[in-house]
Amino acid sequence: MPSLTLTSQELAIMKVIWHRGDSTVREVYETLRTRRRIAYTTVMTMMNVLETKGHLTKGPDGRAFRYRAAQPAQRVLSAMVREFVDRVFDGAATSLLAHLATDTRLSKSQRAELRRLIEAAGK
């Protein structure tokens, strides 16, 4: 089982794959380059790294390969959040929630949604 934590560049690639369902390197590259400058070879290298780490699987698609996520997005993102809480807040999720509740960048509606989610989780 691979470590589910991803670097920011790996996560950007995985988000494209999760959104599309499967993709070639070219399709991921075309999607990413609309958001920022990135080299095709960088995307190809990163996707090979993600396959080696067990995050992607690939199968032939003509002369190219088509990649799919090995794990669903929710599982990977949950593991990344747990790792973040452990590393930054010493495993105390309440410290994270306290930080979010006092973050001045959160709107009133976002705070209300946070409250609603906490209440729903307790039921």
Image: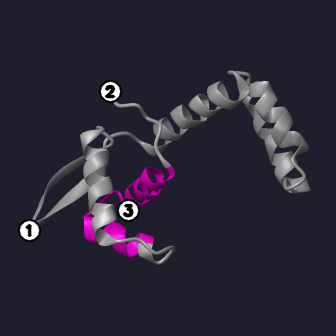
Q: What element carries label 1?
A: loop
Q: Which mark is residue 94?
A: none
**Disc 3 from disc 1: Cα separation:** 20 Å
Residue 76, given in percent of the width and then of the height, sits at 47, 38
Above/below status of 93 relative to 71: above
Number of numbered markers: 3
Most prominent secondary structure in the magenta stretch? Answer: helix
CB under 8 Å between discs 1 and 2: no
**Disc 1 from disc 2: Cα separation:** 29 Å
**Foreground: disc 3 or disc 2:** 2
Residue 107, given in percent of the width and then of the height, sits at 87, 57
Tell me the residue that label 3 is attached to: 20
Q: As drawn, which residue projects farthest toward the bottom?
A: 34
Tell me the residue that label 2 is attached to: 1
Q: As drawn, which residue projects farthest toward the left?
A: 63
Q: Quadrant of residue 21?
A: bottom left
For disc 1, the neighbor class at 10 Å (few under 14, some 14 to 19, many from 20) is few
Residue 12 colored in magenta in the image = yes
What range of the chain is rendered magenta?
A: 8-32
Give the mark, 3 or 1, whose residue is nearer the N terminus. 3
Give the mark, 1 or 2, whose residue is nearer the N terminus. 2
Q: As drawn, which residue projects farthest toward the top?
A: 91
Identify the coloring.
one colour
For disc 2, the neighbor class at 10 Å (few under 14, some 14 to 19, many from 20) is few
Tell me the residue that label 1 is attached to: 63
